[in-house]
Amino acid sequence: MHPAPSVIIFTSISGLGFGLLMWLGLGIPDFYGVASFGVFFMAYALSVGGLLSSVFHLGNKKNAIYAFSQWQTSWLSREGVLAVITLLVFAVYAIGRIFFALNLPVFGYVGAALALLTVFSTSMIYTQLKTVPRWNMAINPVLFLTYAIAGGALLSMQPTVAGVLILLVTVLQWAGWIMGDKRLLDTGSDKGTATGLGAVGKVRMFETAHTARNYILDEMVYHVGRKHSQKLRIIATLLIGVIPVAMLLLLPASMPMAIAVLVIHLAGVFTSRWLFFAEAEHVVSLYYSRG
């Protein structure tokens, strides 16, 4: 699939923001007043900023309103509705802490659950697609949630917890890559199943499906070389987990160190999310290969 920058930013940044909101809903960090305002502002900026970035992927920006109208059948609509409800619930919780030094744990706990449901809905936009076997795996929602929770722990200033969770993310990410590499083959999809001619014999391409670029090729068929893919996986591993974990667990806590860890981890998240899209083989790509 084409790794559109807007969708990479959306899935990375919004997950980080909702992950931070989850921890805030649990009372971590336990701030009130001005300090609380700063943390809630960061969470809202990441959550809303990430969601808004997805609008740039729409051909017609006016269609964004329809993201809220199909909630009964569409995970995209469910994500939009859940995101709005989550932010409204947290608005009450945040106002209590910022302006009245008042803790409203019910709103916090409900908001934390809604934040995780929002991230889960984001993951299901992709996981539900049987036409993209690499996405259609149970580990993908787990990855989205773990990324969000780990990133939120990092932003909520829990170095030890964040270190353990980031290590877990790294292990799960490698499991996802390994499972995904053989996913298309495991589904049994080939040109024979795609055309319905498999029972007749081996089906091969006589001529390419199109003689020029088209929307399907631009959006759904993207090839990344295996050597480049492996290099990027190693880079992502170092940035997501190895370097941040070493810094969190071995270096003394400080604000500059925390910022450095966040920047490095986020760079790794962007790299892994680019691979999430670039390596995803849509079954329609079978029509465009001569094998």
Image (spheres, rainbow, N blue to C red):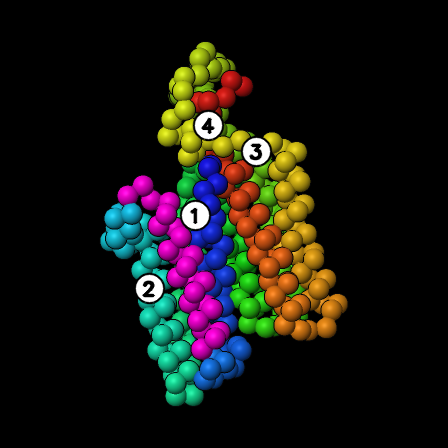
* Kind of residue at badge 4: Ser
Q: CA distance from mark 3 to mark 2?
A: 36 Å
The residue identified by callout 3 is 224
* Kind of residue at badge 1: Ser
The residue identified by callout 4 is 285
Q: Position of residue 91 (x, y in %)?
A: 36, 74
Q: CA distance from mark 1 to mark 4?
A: 23 Å
On screen, residue 290 versus residue 249, left or right, reads left
State the residue at coordinates (67%, 40%).
Answer: 231
The residue identified by callout 1 is 6
Q: CA distance from mark 3 to mark 4?
A: 13 Å
Q: Is residue 101 above or below residue 150?
A: below
* Kind of residue at badge 2: Val
Q: Earlier in the sequence, mark 3 or mark 2?
A: 2
Q: Are marks 2 and 1 in contact (CB under 8 Å)?
A: no
Q: Earlier in the sequence, mark 2 or mark 4?
A: 2
